[in-house]
Amino acid sequence: MAASDLYSSVLSDLTDARSIMLSAAWQAELDKAPPAVRVDSGTALMHLQGAILALSNASLSDIAEDMRANEAELTAAISGLTQALKNITQVQGILNNVTKVLGVVAKVVPLL
């Protein structure tokens, strides 16, 4: 996959995840979760926003090589996140997948 396509895909998927984590349905599920999970969710959302900003502000020519070098890992992490987001009731599973994606994105751009 071309670096530009991978970049667009990752950014789009991260933005979709952020939208879900800001939704009323997500909040309803969080309300059922223990306090530690709610705190983890807020932290994950803040880091997710940082990753979106870092990717959005990065020049593709500066990160293209790192994108290609981490393509398999990015693709797998995003796929896991996309799959997890299909079942919003599995809050911890979604948070785990967000964390995985952020770990890979951090290999491409420095996160805030």
Image: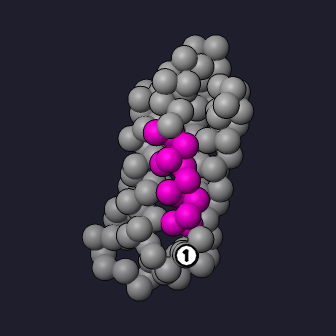
Provide the residue designation for mark 1.
87
Above or below, 109 against 14 in this view is: above
Name the outermost residue toward the bottom. Answer: 32
Above or below, 22 against 14 in this view is: below
Residue 31 visible somewhere in the drawing = yes
Inspect the magenta stretch and tell me whether residue 66 lies in it: no
Query: In the rendered structure, which segment of residues is drawn in magenta?
Result: 73-85
User: What's the residue at 64%, 14% (across, down)?
Assistant: 61
How far from the left and from the top, in percent, is residue 105?
47, 36
Above or below, 28 against 74 in this view is: below
Location of the C terminus (image quadrant): top left
Snapshot quadrant of residue 56: top right
User: What's the residue at 69%, 26% (across, down)?
Assistant: 2
How far from the left and from the top, in percent, is residue 6?
65, 34
How far from the left and from the top, in percent, is residue 15?
64, 50
User: What's the residue at 55%, 53% (across, down)?
Assistant: 79
Above or below, 11 against 5 in this view is: below
Q: Main secondary structure of the magenta part?
A: helix
Q: Give 44 or 73, whichever is nearer the viewer.
A: 73
Type of the residue with mark 1: Asn
How far from the left and from the top, in percent, is residue 14?
59, 49
Inspect the magenta stretch and tell me whether residue 83 lies in it: yes
Q: Is residue 23 rendered to the left or right of residue 30?
A: right
Name the outermost residue toward the top. Answer: 61
